[in-house]
Amino acid sequence: MQFWRPWEMMAKHEHRTTAQPLVLPTATPLHTPSHPFPPLLRPSPHHAASCSAFPLYSALMQTTPFEYRYRLPIQVLLFVLGFTAPWLFLRTLAGVPGFTTSSTWLVLASLLARQGWLSFGAATVLLLVLALLLTGLAAGLRIWGAAYIGAGVVQSASLHGETLLVDGPYRRTRNPLYLGTLLHAFGVTLLMPPSGAVFTVLLVWIFQVRLALAEETFLTQRFGQPYREFQAAVPRFLPGPAAVQAAGRSPRWPQAILGEIYFLGIFLVLAIFGWDFNAQPLRQGVLISAGLWLVLRALVPAQDQKTTAAP
């Protein structure tokens, strides 16, 4: 499926479409004593201008090295908080509309039925199909992206960059893995309380953008003009209508499936057990998928130092 991103026009210079990977022969210095910030925090000129004009944007979008290093545990925590919604135990929120322990699935299906748009049964099926589409697309994007970038790089605590990756999904979007995580968040909110769903989608969305901006800063400093041309040709998130030519990198599917087993597991749990229309066992399936992912992570080889990091 192709998506059009109206707010980011595709550059149409023919020289930006090349069959060779964009390579910087000699890495440029990433840090100088005169600059007070480490590379991960140093904004690009365009990003710095945006931050100075909008202080709130600056505060929200400046990623710290700690956040990038522990991005996986942080994202797990966001999902755990979304599922458990501990704030619902506060007495002050008792009876407040939207602050219920019922699943978003039940709440939305009931709302659609009350409005007369669909019967309750049809609404539950429609929402499940939507969740399957979102989680399936998320799993596919993440496995596809990890197959080219390397599952070890996805899990690495550091940024890497020797050769720009222009194969697989990276021909159409610069951040297929982050896009996959966001689609997954939308899909699993069906099983969360409504307040937990809003909490998770909002914070996961912000976090993916923060991580993407940190990587853009790193790669711009690393590669300079070649990466800026890649930015102009390939959208940040939503895939563009045209793709740059592949460089010929071979995918590593077994490693990718092992590394992304959690996302694949969630899709399979919904596809197999979702038709019982009971959110509780599905939540247990989420826990099992997460546990399996933690075990299989140990089987993923170490990161390939010659690819760019884009978890």
Image (cartoon, rainbow, N blue to C red):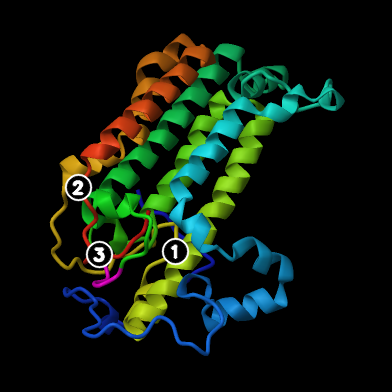
Is 171 on the left or on the right of 33, as rendered?
left
- Measured in 3D between alpha carbons, the distance from the residue under mark 2 to the one under mark 3, in whole angstroms, is 14 Å
Residue topped by disc 2: 301
For the point 16% across and 73% down, which residue is it?
Answer: 19
Give SS at disc 1. Answer: loop
Figure check: 196 above or below 249: above
Is 248 on the left or on the right of 170, as rendered?
left
Is 271 on the left or on the right of 7, as rendered?
left
Give SS at disc 3. Answer: loop
CA neighbours of label 2 inside 10 A, class few (<14), some (14 to 19), many (20+): some
CA neighbours of label 3 inside 10 A, class few (<14), some (14 to 19), many (20+): some
Q: Which residues are magenta?
A: 161-166
Of circles 1 and 3, the one toward us is: 3
Identify residue type, mark 1.
Answer: Arg
Q: Nearer the viewer, residue 297 or 284?
A: 297
Residue topped by disc 3: 307
CA neighbours of label 1 inside 10 A, class few (<14), some (14 to 19), many (20+): many
Kindly identify which numbered label has been placed on residue 236: 1
- Residue 10, visible in the rendered structure: no
Kindly identify which numbered label has been placed on residue 137: none
Image quarter of residue 123: top right
Identify residue type, mark 2.
Answer: Pro
For the point 51% across and 58% down, which residue is it?
Answer: 66
